[in-house]
């Protein structure tokens, strides 16, 4: 069973490696970056907002795996958003 994980732990790894969180500007839309959502005590989801979703998620996956997290790529049901499921082994 995976260990407990906090969204702040995943955020710290991405921020330390120079990635910026996304922001929404009402005038121009999404400023590209990552967004993290806690999904229960043992899983965190990572999304990329803005253009370059697939490339952004791949870069995040590599950084998080290098930091020792277990990362699985996924897509929401019905052809929805791509995301990463992040757990601790």
Image (tube, rainbow, N blue to C red):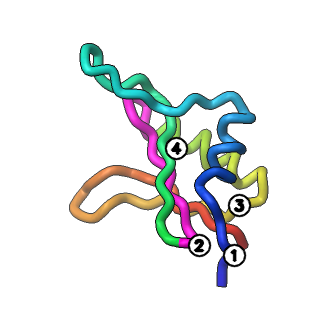
Q: Residue 42 carries which label?
A: 2
Q: Nearer the viewer, residue 14 or 41?
A: 41
Q: Nearer the viewer, residue 17 or 61?
A: 17
Q: Which of 66 and 86 is in front in this view?
A: 86
Tell whether position 65 is magenta: no
- In primary-sequence order, the first of circles 2 and 1 is 1
How far apart are the two marked residues, 4 and 1, measured between alpha carbons?
23 Å
Segment tinted magenta in the rendering: 41-53
Q: Residues within 10 Å of mark 4 (few under 14, many from 20)?
A: many
Q: In this view, does 55 lie above or below 86?
A: above
Q: Which mark is residue 57?
A: 4
Residue 26 on image: x %, y %: 26, 20
Left-right relation of 66 to 26: right
Residue 77 on image: x %, y %: 27, 64
How far apart are the two marked residues, 2 and 4, measured between alpha carbons?
20 Å
Q: Which residue lies furthest to the left in this view?
A: 78
């Amino acid at each position: 069973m995976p260990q407990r994980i906090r969204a702040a732990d995943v955020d710290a790894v991405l921020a330390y490696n120079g990635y910026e969180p996304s922001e929404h500007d009402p005038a121009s839309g999404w400023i590209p970056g990552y967004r993290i959502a806690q999904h229960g005590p043992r899983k965190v989801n990572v999304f990329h907002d803005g253009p370059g979703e697939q490339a952004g998620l791949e870069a995040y996956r590599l950084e998080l795996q290098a930091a020792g997290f277990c990362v699985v790529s996924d897509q929401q049901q019905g052809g929805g958003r791509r995301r990463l499921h992040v757990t601790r082994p």
